[in-house]
Image (cartoon, rainbow, N blue to C red):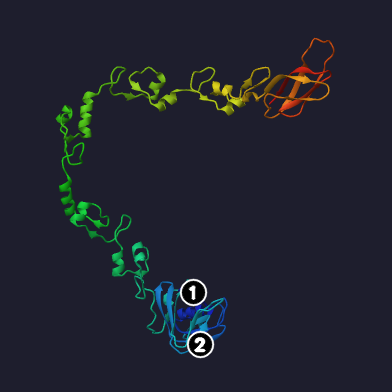
Amino acid sequence: MALPIIITDAGRAALINAQNTGTGPVLLSQIALGTGNYNPLPGRLALAAEFKRLNTIGGAVVAHDTIHVTIKDESADAYTASEFGIYTDGGVLFAVYSAPVGSVTAKAAPAVMLLAFDMVLSTIAANSVTFGAVQFVNPPATTEVVGVVELATNAETQAGTDATRAVTPAGLSSRTATETRAGLASVATQAQTDTGADDATIVTPKKLATRLNALLVQATELAFGWTKIATQAQTDTGADDATIVTPKKLATRLNALLVQATELAFGWTKIATQAQTDTGTDDTATVTPKKLRAWVKQATEGLLGMAKVATQAQTDAGADDATIVTPKKLRWGVTYSIGSNGYIILPSWLGGFTIQYGQQGGINNATPVNVMFPIGFPSAAYAVVATQVSNGATASRIVEVVIRATTYFDAWGNTGSNAIYWIAVGK
């Protein structure tokens, strides 16, 4: 495992002194165990609570900036350690690590404590330090370092992406070939090749040839098979039904057959250029939709051309001057009912203005009469005007009206029971 081990200032100084005096790499010879919990700093000179030192420490360079360190304790001691420090042979605390909480390792009396970790020296060359001749380092194996390696599972072998685990023969045999993965495959038998149902074996050229020789027959309209290429004479004659025509021979025959298309004869034709389309005088070329669209112009008051049909919203707004209004959209919203009582509703593009009219009997000067509109106004009733139906009398007759809702108004007069004519507007 990789731990955030702190190289102390004293440890760096020991390396610098060794380089200045020309001595060899600094020898790391002991490891101290303690029970302190803290975040160590480079200025530390000793553990917070040391209880034991071991000289069974080994290390090996596994990368240019990484040392794999192994610690071993075969004593009968029992303990729990939460900090450790690596000392040089001169007694200098070279590196220290402490778990802020919890422990780093624990040992029971009958057990052997074996602690292994990687120490990354980000600004120090890994070959600047060395260890005693302890033979239990067991660094992780790489392509350049002999060491311990974990065996890959079948799933890891089949995935083929793990670069740290080793593949066994059994694991290798599980990596079979599929459409999406390279791998091992067995050779299909002739029976499997003939059946064509097995999707996990591979076909050899020999078995494929045997199968094709048994399958290939003369092609017909009802059966796949082999065939010959027709000669030009066979193509021109058009009588042979057992050969196939190539594009070249077909083109030769068509060139002899096809003539310029006219109003009376099928044939070949050219695509008109934009200039020919715009001029409108060439009668031997055909116009494509693209060139026709480029020729047609927007219709205006002074120019024949194309125009879009206006939407209902454009018709109602009355602001768009480049589209055309259809009878349906012009008529949209006009409804009416003509009779003794009736109404007419103008189109939505005229605001939906509504006129209603009718007659009502029984109007008197005692009780207001509810006069119902033929239909309710959708939004509001603006005004009602009423007049009493004349009975030939010369006395003055007054009709009063009050709009009560969008569906009716009240009316009463200044004489006995009479009928009225009325008209109302709203929307």
Q: Which label is found at residue 52?
A: 2
Q: Residue placed at 37% from the left, 63% from the top?
A: 161
The amino acid pointed to by label 1 is Leu
Q: Residue placed at 17% from the left, 28% from the top?
A: 238
SS class, disc 2: strand
In what quadrant of the picture does the C terminus appear? Answer: top right
Up the image or down, 97 lies above or below 205; here it is below
Up the image or down, 176 lies above or below 64; here it is above
Disc with the residue nearer the chain's start (2 vs 1):
1
SS class, disc 1: loop
Q: How far is mark 2 from mark 1, CA to CA? A: 21 Å
Regarding residue 40, the answer to whether it shows in the image is no
Q: Which residue is mark 1?
A: 3
Q: Residue placed at 27% from the left, 57% from the top?
A: 200
Q: Which label is found at residue 282?
A: none
Up the image or down, 312 lies above or below 222; here it is above
Q: Is residue 418 left or right of residue 76?
A: right
